[in-house]
Amino acid sequence: MTVASLSPQPTPTYGRPRRALRQEWQLVICALGIYACYMRYGLLQERIYSREYGAHSEKFTYSSFLVAVQTFTNAAVAFLVMCSGLFPAPPKAPKNIDEPNKPNSFGVIRGVPLFDYAFVALSYLSAMLFSFTALNHMSYPMQALGKSCKMIPVMLMGIVIRRHKYSLREYLCVAFISIGVAMFSWNSNKAAHAAPTSPLGFMLLFASLFMDGVTGPLQERLVARHKPSTHQLMFWQNISSVAWLLIGLLVTGEGVRALAFVLRHPHVMVDIMQFSLVSAVGQNFIFYTVRNFNALLVTTITTTRKMFTVLLSIFIFNHPMEPRKWLGLVLVFAAISWEAAAKQRAKRLKAEKQPQEKAFKKDQ
């Protein structure tokens, strides 16, 4: 290679704008994909649980069956994506030739840590089942609002277990979220026809948030130890979930009851399949956005998406609203947005600080 070949070549004036335009369009498509998939996901979830089927006004209450269809669809989509090569897995570090071959550890079969995936799947499933079952005891806007409040159980566990000290901003965020949820959940006499929120509903919601908090560290440990790609993690976690759910459906008899319900009301299966497909496709839009842009954009998109989903649910399903409920809704989403922006600012400052620290050590 000559020196001339290394020198910068003149770039046509249209090259950069076109590339920037392509990136902008990719971001627009990803954002629209996330909005479309997850707003549809939320509305379908509410329709499945709130709709009355048949002459006897039966309601769908088979959360395990719904999650089984969803996790199977997620696994199928992840498998198809892996086969397509659309998102290739990052190359693994080359193995040292001198290093002796180590036998597979307990629960690792042909390089797949099935036992680790089984534990992750169990916590992941528990979070989903608690969340879905909560819909039998509260309205969808209340459930969606509650699921956005992950800060509360995380902070409580941090204080009780790790004796962690939090900043004034974090305490204020949790206070705003708690006040907002309380304002939104309380129904006055004017809203007597509103869907009641029972203590059991709150307990299930809190249990779901707690299991979300357990799932994250388990996934991080699995990724750090075995380094699967995103779609490998998605496939094995969901296929492990299907295995757990099949056992549960057979033992409890819910599988037979759910199938009987579907046979009596076959149109419910159309909603269930749509619900599962938009969930799986939405996960891929999120993955593509994280991979090609940054986490701040995903946080912004998902936070605003939740807000718009709640608003859509209020208007489409005619949930009664009062000024107090609107204020509670604004308080919760303002606090969540404040916390997300503060976290991203802290990450950016940390990233800017690291090169300066390295340069300072080098000068010494």
Image (cartoon, grey):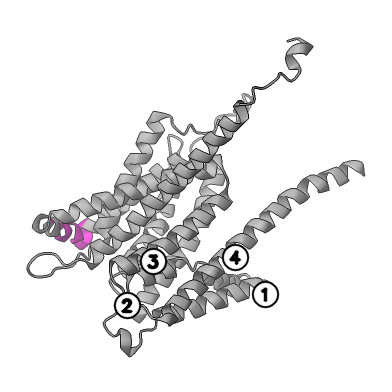
Q: Closer to the observer: label 1 or label 3?
A: 3
Which amino acid is tagged 2? Pro
Asked whether the residues under the numbered discs 1 and 4 touch, taking CB atoms below 8 Å apart as contact, a structural biologist would say no
**Is any part of residue 215 visible from this angle?**
no
Determine the CA span between mark 3 and mark 2.
12 Å
Q: Are marks 3 and 2 in contact (CB under 8 Å)?
A: no
- Distance from disc 1 to disc 4, alpha carbons, whole Å, reads 12 Å
Q: CA distance from mark 3 to mark 4?
A: 21 Å
The structure residue drawn at horizontal position 35% and vertical position 50%, both measured from the top left corner, is 279
Which residue is denoted by mark 3 in the rendering?
311
Q: Residue furthest right?
A: 364
Q: Which residue is mark 2?
A: 320
Q: Give the residue displayed 47% in from the left and 56% down from the top.
A: 302
The quarter of the image holding the N terminus is: top right
Q: Along the polypeptide, which appears first: circle 1 or circle 4?
A: 1
Query: Mainly helix, strand or loop, the magenta region?
Result: helix
List x then y, in percent, for residue 194.
29, 79
Q: Earlier in the sequence, mark 1 or mark 3?
A: 1
